[in-house]
């Protein structure tokens, strides 16, 4: 399982967000360049269609592949009352032949994208990852060098943390607590819930840029 929230920020304020994250996390960022291929199963594979994502880390000298399957979200009254999405998620490392394998199994290409930005990995009540990236679409099949932004001037911010059925409440609390520190720059919510750009972002970014960042908390 994983806990996840998302939000958007204008590209002009990303540097200020990075300064804030550096101060909060106390670790250096990692560059992010992920080629993501989304595949969907054909009608001959079971009665229920499934979706898998193949992620290729292009920042590595020898690009590595990961298979990721995102399942259903937690349901019920408890799930509705929390601001973090808790969902099933399984991922595993794979070889460079993984795309060929899924094609052989009957999966079809749905879409592909290139995510470019940076990530912070740290522990704050739970292992948390914050990614800030621009989402780019490919004009030609697998042509990552020719990718263009889907939403110019806007970047996606995602906060995720692994969880289990036993500890998800603690992880949700850790993610929610951390997100409060980012509130002046952006609002984070469950994926699919659009909240737009925060009105206070410009003032908060100017303050962060003037004092060079915060103190690790």
Image (cartoon, helix red, strand yellow):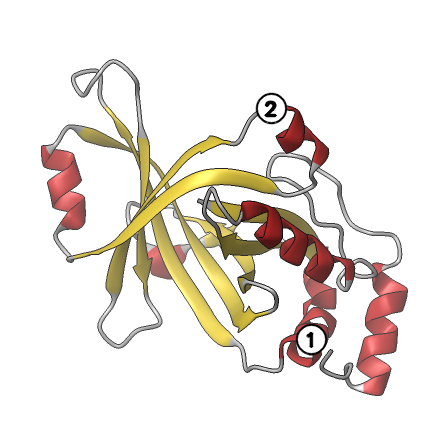
Which image quarter: residue 105?
top left
* Residue drawn at x 48%, y 62% as measured from the top left: 116
Name the disc covering residue 188, or none.
none
Q: State the residue lying farthest toward the front.
A: 166
The answer to whether residue 98 is visible is yes
Seen in the picture, residue 14 relative to 171 is either above or below; the reply is below
Residue 95, image x, y percentages:
15, 57
Residue 165, image x, y percentages:
47, 42
Residue 90, image x, y percentages:
34, 45
* Disc 2, SS: loop
Q: Quadrant of the N terminus?
A: top left
Name the disc covering residue 76, or none.
2
The answer to whether residue 151 is visible is no
Residue bearing the label numbered 1: 24
| Figure label count | 2
Front residue of 17 and 3: 3
**Callout 2 environment at 10 Å: few (<14), some (14 to 19), or many (20+)?**
few
* Residue drawn at x 55%, y 60% as measured from the top left: 133
* Residue drawn at x 39%, y 48% as measured from the top left: 138
Left or right for 126, reference 179:
left
* Disc 1, SS: helix
Residue 13, image x, y percentages:
74, 66
Q: Nearer the viewer, mark 2 or mark 1?
A: 2
**Callout 1 environment at 10 Å: few (<14), some (14 to 19), or many (20+)?**
some
């Amino acid at each position: 399982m994983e806990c996840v929230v998302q939000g958007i920020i204008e590209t002009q304020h990303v540097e200020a967000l990075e300064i804030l994250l550096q101060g909060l996390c106390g670790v250096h960022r990692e560059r992010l360049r992920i080629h993501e291929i989304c595949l969907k199963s054909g009608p001959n594979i079971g009665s229920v269609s499934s979706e898998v994502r193949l992620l290729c880390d292009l920042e590595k000298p020898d690009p590595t592949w990961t298979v990721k399957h995102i399942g259903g979200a937690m349901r019920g009254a408890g799930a509705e009352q929390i601001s973090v999405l808790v969902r099933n998620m399984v991922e595993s490392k794979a070889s460079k032949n993984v795309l060929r394998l899924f094609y052989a199994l009957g999966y079809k290409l749905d879409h592909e994208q290139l995510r470019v930005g940076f990530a912070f990995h740290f522990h704050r009540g739970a292992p948390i990852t914050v990614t800030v990236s621009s989402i780019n679409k490919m004009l030609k099949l697998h042509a990552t060098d020719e990718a263009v932004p889907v939403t110019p001037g806007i970047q996606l911010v995602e906060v995720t943390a692994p969880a289990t059925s036993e500890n998800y409440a603690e992880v949700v609390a850790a993610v929610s607590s951390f997100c409060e520190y980012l509130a002046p720059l952006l609002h984070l919510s469950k994926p699919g819930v659009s909240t737009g750009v925060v009105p206070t972002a410009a003032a908060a970014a100017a303050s962060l840029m003037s004092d060079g960042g915060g103190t690790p908390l």
